[in-house]
Every structure is written in C-alpha cells, then in structure tokens.
C-alpha cells in the first residue's frame, strides 16, 4: 500500500512539473549533458513493422511504413546489449507483434534476462501462439477492442473480427487458468474512446468482463499517430468524443517520454517513440554494438534535450504528451481463484 501511494504521488508530481513554465525554464538553462541524468527505463522494441489491419489513423495500416520483421538472432543480440537500468520492453511499436512468428521465443529470452515484457495486439492471430505464450514469461498483454458490436469495432479497427478476437481472448484466459506458470500475469483489454463508441461504454465493460480478463482500460483518442493526419485534419478531429472528459489534454511543456526510446526492426534507435517516419535516428545498435554509447553519447545529447523540451518538428502536434488513460471509467475485474 505504501509503495502504491508513493508511486501515485510521484506520478502526480511529475505531471505538475511537466506543465510548469518555471520548471521548463530551468531545464532549458541546463547543459545538454544533464539530460543523461534521466536514464532510459522503457524500450519500444519493434519486432514487426507490419500489420494485418487498416486502422483509420495508423500510418502502418495505411501503408505509410515499410513492412519488416526482426529475426531472432538480431533480437537476442539487442537484448544482450541493453543495460539493466531498462525495466520494461514493450513489443508493440509500429506493427503488430503477432505477425512475427518468433515473438514468443523473443519474449521468453527477454524474460530470462530479467526484463519485464509487454505486448499490445489486435488479437486476430494470437490463437497460433497460446501454448508458447503461457510458457514465455510474458508480464502483460493488452487486446484492442473499441466496440461492443462488429459494426463499431470495424469502424476504427478496420479489418478486425470481433468474434474472432473474443474467442482468442477466451483461449488465452483459459490456458493461463490451467497452466502452472500463470502467465501472462495480466490480460487486459484496451479501448480507445471516440465519437463512435462514447455512448457504448457500459456495453463494452460488460462484454469485456464476460471474457474473463483482468481489466479494461479506456484510452483517449490520438488522431495524428506519428504526427500525421492520414485522412486530413478535419476528418480525424471530427472523431473526437463529444464528452470533453474523454478527450486528451495536451498541455505538457516537457515530454514525459524522455525515459523511453524505440528500436526498429533493423536495429536503428529512434530518440522518440512516436517517430513513425524514422526521422530522428540516433544510431544502429547492431552496427555500433552498443546501446549506451548511442543514447548517452555526446553527439546525441542535444537531440535528447530537444525531445524533453518538445522542440523537434514532430513535437508540435505530438498526440501522446497528455492524459493517455481515463481511469474514471476503466475497471478491474475480480478473478476467481482456480482450484
């Protein structure tokens, strides 16, 4: 309980400082090397830049990102090069992880090396990997469901099959229940609130609870993923929910993701986890055989400080520097203990 209170207080303090003009001014006056006092603790590891859906706002689904897969040898070398200051490896960057057939082996390798692991997936292909997943040591998996009916689900997640996703979730929940390891530790559904579904939230909660998952997490809508309006700004912004409580407030002066970076399937390290166009590459972890020299090296200090102060070109319309989650309507479901 004390740890939980401390974490909540720390998050609130960070949020207040990130909106403070005075604090931003202090940061602006610091030398570039000072940014290295803030270590990377989370890596977005792209093992797939391909996807099997065509989501409305996504550069990948709209064929703006070349498809590619990371091989197992490259993955394992990257894991071996990551410092222990990194706590979490998220296998969900530009593509869907399930298009890489080696992803359960990758998660298992990272788990064995002591990293916490997370994936977010559309869930369409997860049934191929159920047995491997429950043995992989995966900590968290989030499935994306944005509608309680196929019609609503298909408006945002174009090409998805709601019944298939529900069936696959039940398979994983059941497999975890009957496994000795009890992995993944957390199975959740993530739902983006838009004008399509803002009046259907109770139906979504009921649907997800019946699947037997641990929780449903509602997320605010980002209409310009990667800083781009794929179908035009007017089209995208018309899909914001009418209820302003469900809209993202982007009032941060400092980037909260200075402690994260992305590693692409070819080993390139991007300074920003919304750099979907790969414009801000710091170096290549495979060719340079180092993570720390690239991230904390002298030549990249100024770029990292620019991220912190939100002065890069992609920062102007950044969709993630705000309230990502909507805790007021998110729900945790009590789990029945298996006998």
Image: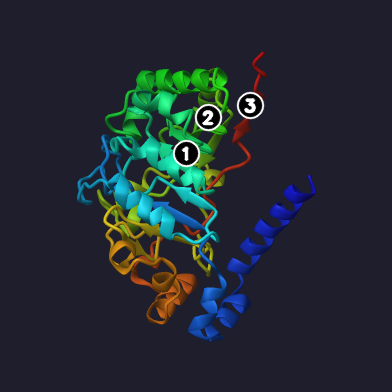
Nearest the viewer among 262 and 145 is: 262
Q: Secondary structure at mark 2?
A: helix
Q: Secondary structure at mark 1?
A: loop
Residue corresponding to mark 1? 193
Cβ–Cβ below 8 Å for labels 2 and 1? yes
Marks 3, 1: nearer the viewer: 3
Residue at the image position 45 percent from the left and 59 percent from the top: 82
Nearest the viewer among 111 and 273 is: 111
Quarter that holds the C terminus: top right
Marks 2, 3: nearer the viewer: 3
Q: Earlier in the sequence, mark 2 or mark 1?
A: 1
Q: Earlier in the sequence, mark 2 or mark 3?
A: 2
Q: Earlier in the sequence, mark 3 or mark 1?
A: 1
Q: Residue furthest right?
A: 2
Residue corresponding to mark 2? 201
Relative vertical location of residue 86 with respect to residue 329 in this rendering, above or below: below
Q: Secondary structure at mark 3?
A: loop
* Distance between mark 2 and mark 3 Cα atoms: 15 Å
Residue at the image position 48 percent from the left and 83 percent from the top: 32
Left or right of 302? Residue 333 is right
Residue 92 horizontal/vertical position (percent): 39, 45
* Distance between mark 3 and mark 1 Cα atoms: 20 Å
| Residue 194 in view, yes or no | no
Residue corresponding to mark 3? 333
Quarter that holds the N terminus: top right
* Distance between mark 2 and mark 1 Cα atoms: 8 Å
Residue at the image position 37 percent from the left and 72 percent from the top: 312
Residue 10 horizontal/vertical position (percent): 69, 59
Number of labels in the image equals: 3
Residue 251 horizontal/vertical position (percent): 53, 63
Nearest the viewer among 93 and 299 is: 299
Residue at the image position 49 percent from the left and 59 percent from the top: 321
């Amino acid at each position: 309980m004390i740890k939980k209170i401390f974490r909540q207080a720390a998050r609130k303090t960070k949020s207040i400082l990130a909106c403070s003009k005075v604090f931003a001014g202090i940061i602006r006056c610091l030398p570039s090397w000072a940014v290295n006092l803030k270590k990377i603790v989370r890596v977005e590891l792209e093992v797939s830049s391909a996807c099997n859906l065509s989501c409305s706002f996504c550069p990948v689904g709209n064929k703006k990102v070349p498809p590619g897969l990371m091989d197992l040898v490259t993955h394992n070398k990257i894991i071996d090069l990551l410092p222990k200051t990194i706590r979490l490896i998220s296998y969900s960057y530009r593509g869907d992880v399930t298009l890489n057939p080696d992803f359960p082996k990758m998660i298992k390798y990272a788990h064995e090396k002591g990293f916490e692991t997370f994936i977010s997936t559309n869930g369409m292909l997860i049934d191929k990997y159920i047995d491997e997943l429950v043995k992989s040591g995966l900590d968290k998996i989030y499935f994306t469901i944005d509608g309680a009916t196929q019609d609503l689900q298909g408006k945002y997640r174009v090409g998805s099959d709601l019944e298939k996703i529900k069936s696959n979730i039940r398979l994983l929940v059941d497999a975890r229940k009957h496994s000795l390891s009890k992995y993944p530790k957390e199975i959740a559904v993530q739902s983006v609130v838009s004008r399509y579904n803002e009046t259907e939230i109770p139906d979504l909660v009921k649907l997800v609870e019946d699947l037997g998952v641990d929780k449903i997490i509602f997320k605010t809508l980002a209409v310009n993923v990667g800083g781009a309006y794929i179908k035009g700004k007017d089209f995208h912004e018309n899909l914001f929910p009418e209820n302003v409580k469900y809209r993202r407030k982007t009032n941060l002066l400092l980037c909260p993701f200075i402690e994260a970076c992305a590693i692409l399937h070819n080993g390139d390290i991007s300074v920003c986890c919304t750099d979907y166009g790969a414009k801000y590459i710091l170096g290549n972890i495979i060719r340079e055989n180092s993570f720390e020299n690239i991230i904390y090296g002298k030549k990249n200090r100024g770029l990292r400080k620019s991220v912190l102060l939100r002065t890069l070109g992609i920062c102007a319309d950044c969709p993630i520097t705000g309230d990502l989650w909507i805790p007021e309507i998110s729900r945790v479901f009590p789990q029945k203990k298996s006998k």
